[in-house]
Image (spheres, grey):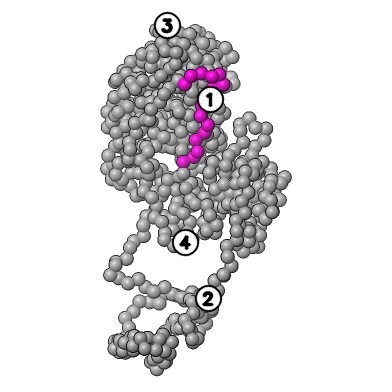
C-alpha cells in the first residue's frame, strides 16, 4: 500500500499545488508543504521528516472512514504493507487507521506516474519498457510475499523515479471493495487494467496482478490500453471475452505481453519467468539501468518534482519523528535470476524548506519525565503538557524566580517587605557574615534565631528548632491545621529482569511476577498480560493497565512510572516492530514489552515475538482499576 498520487504533468508550480482553504495545515503532527493531487480515495499532501526526507501523506475521504468494514480492511492492509520494504515500492512509514479520517504516509517519490509520462511524452522505448516491467515484477514479488494482492495495478499507480519504477497504492483497492460507496458513484480502480476474473467477480489471486502487468507493458510500449477505451461495460466485456489488440506492441515485447494476458490465471508466467523474459528480450544478457534509462523529457519531469516548494508561512512545529522500522529482508526470487537493476540513490531534497521539517521537541531538564510525543499520538486524547513540542515561555533574566513552597504549603504571595525591617535585615546580614568568619555557621544560626524571636517573626516556613537545617521533605507545616509532608522513600529501584524472544500465542497470557516469564494458556481470567484471540493485548488484572509508548520514546522504568495514557487493551494492528508497551500489574510489578516480530502469514498459529523487561514491586499494589 502507498499513499502517493501524482497530479497533472507540468512545472514544479503545477506539481506542488498550494494548500486551499479546505486543506489542513497539519496531519497528526506532519506539517503539510503542498498538495500533490487527489483521487477517488482522498487527497495526497507533501510533508517532510526532521532529517529532510520528503513524505507523501494520503488522507482517506471521510465517507470511507464512516464504513466499519472499510476501516477493518484498511487497518489489515496497512499492517501488511508496513512489512513491504522492496527496492521498487514506496514504503509505508506511518498511518492512522482509527482517526476521524484515516491516513497513511509513505516515502515521497520524485517522479511522474507512467500515465502522466505517456500522455505528455508518448510511448516509452523498448529498453525502458523492459527495465520498467522487470522493476515492477520485483515490486510484485515483495508485495505478494507480504500476503497482499495489489488489485489495482495500472499506469497511474507506477511512478518513474531516477533509479527505477515505484509501485504504489497496493492493498487500497481491497479496502475500498468493502464499502458500499464503490457502488454509488465513487469509482475505485480503472476497468481498462482489470483481469478477467476481477471483471467477472471471481476469486482474485497474485496472478491477477500479472495480467495487469501485461496491460501496463502494452500501454507503456504503445500509449493505448490493450483492450481499448470506452465505457466501463464495453472494456470489461472485451477483457473477459475478446483477445487484446497487440498490433502496436514491438516484437521484442510480444511474448512477454501475450503470456501475461492469458485468460487462464494458471497459464500466466511467474515473477521469475517475467524477469527472465525481460532479460532474453534485452540485447544484454543482464539488465542494467543506465543513468538515462528514461527519455530526456521524462527525466526533466523528475527534476521538476525534486525541487522543494517554498513555504508561505511556517505552521507550528509538531513533536519528534518516529523511529524508522527495520527493513524487511531483501528480494530473492525463487528461481535464481540476475538483478534487473543496479540502482543509484534517488535524487531527493537534502533538507526541507524553512518552516517544514518537524523540529525536535523541547526536552525538560529534570528527570523523570516522559519522552516527547511523536509525530502522531495513537490515542485521541490530547498530549500531556510536559510532552508538548513548544518551549515554555522564559522569564526575564532580570526577574528573580519565586522560591518554591515547601511540601504541603501553597506558594506564598509575592510582596514587598515592610520598610521598617529593611535596615534591620541589612544589619543582620552583616552580622552573619562577621560571625561566620570568626565562629562558624553554628553561632550565626543561633544569632539569626534569636533575632527572629525578638522581632516576633511569624513567617509561613520556619527552620526547625534542631541544631542543623533539615531537608524540605522532613519539615513540618507552619501555622495551625498543617500536616507533615510525607517522607521520601529511600528504597532503591528494583533490578530489571529481562526475558528475550517470548512467542506469545493468541489465547495465551504472561504473568510478570513469575521467575521465568513464559506463555500460559488462557486469555480471560484476570491475567496481567494476555493476547486475546480478538486481536488485541489485554491487561485484565485488578488495577492493571498498559500504555503504548510513542515511536522514538525511550522505554525505561522512569518513563513507565511517569506515563498516564492508560489503556486496558491495545490492538495488535497498531503495533509494529520496535514498538514498546508499559504494563503495570495490580500486584505492583512494572513491565516493558518490546515487539520484535509477528507470525508469518502462512504460520498455523498467530503469535507475537516479544522482549519483556520486568521491575518487580516497582509500584504500590492496587486494589482497584
Residue depth check, mark 4 versus mark 3: number of the one nearer the observer = 4
Circles 1 and 4: CB atoms closer than 8 Å: no
Q: Residues within 10 Å of mark 1 (few under 14, many from 20)?
A: few
> Of the residues tagged 1 and 4, which is closer to the observer?
1
- The residue to which callout 1 is attached is 332
Q: Is residue 544 visible?
A: no
Query: Residue 347: horizontal and vertical position, in percent?
Result: 34, 31
Place of residue 151 in the rendered image (x, y in percent of width and height, measured from the top left)? 51, 24
CA–CA distance in space, label 1 to label 2: 66 Å
For disc 3, the marked residue is 251
Q: Evaluate if marks 1 and 3 touch, with contact meaning CB atoms under 8 Å apart.
A: no
Going by the picture, which residue comes out furthest to the right? 521
Q: Is residue 395 left or right of residue 130?
A: left
N-term-proximal mark, 1 vs 4: 1
Q: Quadrant of the C terminus?
A: bottom right
Q: Which mark is residue 367?
A: 4
Examine the rendered structure and indicate whether residue 188 appears above or below residue 367: above
Label 2 packing within 10 angstroms: few (<14), some (14-19), many (20+): some
Q: Are marks 4 and 3 in contact (CB under 8 Å)?
A: no
What x and y, as percent, mark residue 355? Answer: 31, 45
The label shown at residue 485 is 2
Q: CA distance from mark 4 to mark 3?
A: 70 Å
Between discs 2 and 4, the one toward the N terminus:
4
Q: Which mark is residue 463?
A: none
Above or below for 321 versus 176: below
Amino acid at each position: 500500500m502507498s499513499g502517493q498520487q501524482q497530479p497533472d504533468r507540468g512545472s514544479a508550480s503545477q506539481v506542488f499545488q498550494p494548500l486551499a482553504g479546505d486543506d489542513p495545515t497539519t496531519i497528526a503532527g506532519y506539517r503539510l508543504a503542498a498538495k500533490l493531487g487527489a483521487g477517488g480515495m482522498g487527497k495526497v499532501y507533501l510533508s517532510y521528516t526532521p532529517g529532510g526526507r520528503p513524505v507523501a501523506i494520503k488522507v482517506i475521504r471521510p465517507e470511507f472512514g464512516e464504513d466499519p468494514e472499510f476501516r477493518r480492511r484498511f487497518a489489515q492492509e496497512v499492517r501488511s504493507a508496513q512489512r513491504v520494504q522492496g527496492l521498487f515500492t514506496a514504503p509505508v512509514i506511518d498511518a492512522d487507521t482509527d482517526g476521524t479520517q484515516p491516513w497513511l504516509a509513505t516515502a515521497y517519490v520524485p517522479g511522474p506516474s507512467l500515465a502522466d509520462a505517456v500522455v505528455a511524452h508518448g510511448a516509452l522505448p523498448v529498453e525502458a519498457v523492459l527495465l520498467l516491467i522487470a522493476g515492477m515484477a520485483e515490486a510484485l514479488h515483495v508485495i505478494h510475499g507480504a500476503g497482499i494482492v495489489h488489485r489495482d495495478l495500472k499506469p497511474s499507480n507506477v511512478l518513474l523515479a531516477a533509479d527505477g519504477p515505484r509501485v504504489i497504492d497496493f492493498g487500497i483497492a481491497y479496502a475500498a471493495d468493502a464499502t458500499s460507496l464503490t457502488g454509488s458513484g465513487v469509482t475505485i480502480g480503472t476497468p481498462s487494467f482489470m483481469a478477467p476474473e476481477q471483471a467477472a467477480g471471481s476469486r482474485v489471486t497474485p496472478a491477477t496482478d500479472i495480467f495487469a502487468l501485461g496491460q501496463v507493458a502494452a500501454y507503456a510500449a504503445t500509449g493505448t490500453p490493450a483492450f481499448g477505451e470506452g465505457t466501463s461495460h464495453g472494456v470489461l466485456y472485451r477483457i473477459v471475452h475478446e483477445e487484446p489488440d497487440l498490433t502496436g506492441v514491438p516484437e521484442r515485447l510480444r511474448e512477454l505481453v501475450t503470456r501475461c494476458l492469458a485468460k487462464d490465471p494458471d497459464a500466466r508466467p511467474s515473477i521469475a519467468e517475467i524477469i527472465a523474459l525481460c532479460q532474453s528480450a534485452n540485447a544484454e544478457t543482464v539488465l542494467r539501468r543506465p543513468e538515462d534509462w528514461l527519455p530526456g523529457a521524462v527525466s526533466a519531469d523528475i527534476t521538476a518534482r525534486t525541487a522543494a516548494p517554498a513555504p508561505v508561512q511556517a505552521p507550528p512545529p509538531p513533536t519528534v519523528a518516529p523511529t524508522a522500522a527495520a527493513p524487511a529482508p531483501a528480494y530473492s526470487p525463487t528461481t535464481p535470476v540476475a538483478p534487473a537493476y543496479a540502482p543509484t540513490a534517488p535524487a531527493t531534497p537534502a533538507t526541507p524548506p524553512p518552516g517544514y521539517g518537524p523540529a525536535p521537541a523541547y526536552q525538560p531538564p529534570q528527570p523523570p519525565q516522559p519522552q516527547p510525543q511523536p509525530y502522531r499520538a495513537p490515542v485521541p486524547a490530547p498530549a500531556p503538557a510536559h510532552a508538548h513540542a513548544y518551549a515554555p515561555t522564559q522569564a526575564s533574566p532580570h526577574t528573580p524566580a519565586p522560591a518554591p513552597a515547601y511540601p504541603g504549603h501553597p506558594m506564598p504571595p509575592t510582596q514587598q517587605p515592610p520598610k521598617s525591617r529593611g535596615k534591620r535585615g541589612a544589619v543582620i546580614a552583616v552580622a552573619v557574615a562577621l560571625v561566620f568568619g570568626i565562629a562558624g555557621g553554628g553561632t550565626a544560626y543561633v544569632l539569626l534565631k534569636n533575632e527572629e524571636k525578638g522581632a516576633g517573626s511569624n513567617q509561613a516556613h520556619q527552620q526547625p528548632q534542631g541544631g542543623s537545617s533539615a531537608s524540605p521533605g522532613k519539615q513540618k507545616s507552619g501555622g495551625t491545621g498543617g500536616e507533615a509532608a510525607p517522607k521520601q522513600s529511600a528504597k532503591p529501584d528494583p533490578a530489571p529482569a529481562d526475558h528475550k524472544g517470548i512467542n506469545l500465542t493468541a489465547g495465551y497470557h504472561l504473568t510478570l511476577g513469575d521467575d521465568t516469564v513464559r506463555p500460559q494458556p488462557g486469555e480471560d481470567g484476570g491475567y496481567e498480560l494476555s493476547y486475546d484471540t480478538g486481536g488485541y493485548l489485554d491487561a485484565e488484572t485488578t488495577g492493571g493497565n498498559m500504555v503504548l509508548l510513542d515511536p522514538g520514546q525511550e522505554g525505561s522504568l522512569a518513563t513507565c512510572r511517569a506515563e498516564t495514557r492508560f489503556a486496558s487493551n491495545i490492538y495488535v494492528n497498531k503495533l509494529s516492530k520496535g514498538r514498546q508497551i508499559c504494563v503495570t500489574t495490580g500486584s505492583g510489578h512494572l513491565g516493558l514489552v518490546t515487539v520484535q516480530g509477528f507470525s508469518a502469514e502462512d504460520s498455523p498459529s498467530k503469535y507475537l515475538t516479544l522482549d519483556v523487561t520486568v521491575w518487580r514491586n516497582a509500584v504500590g499494589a492496587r486494589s482497584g482499576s
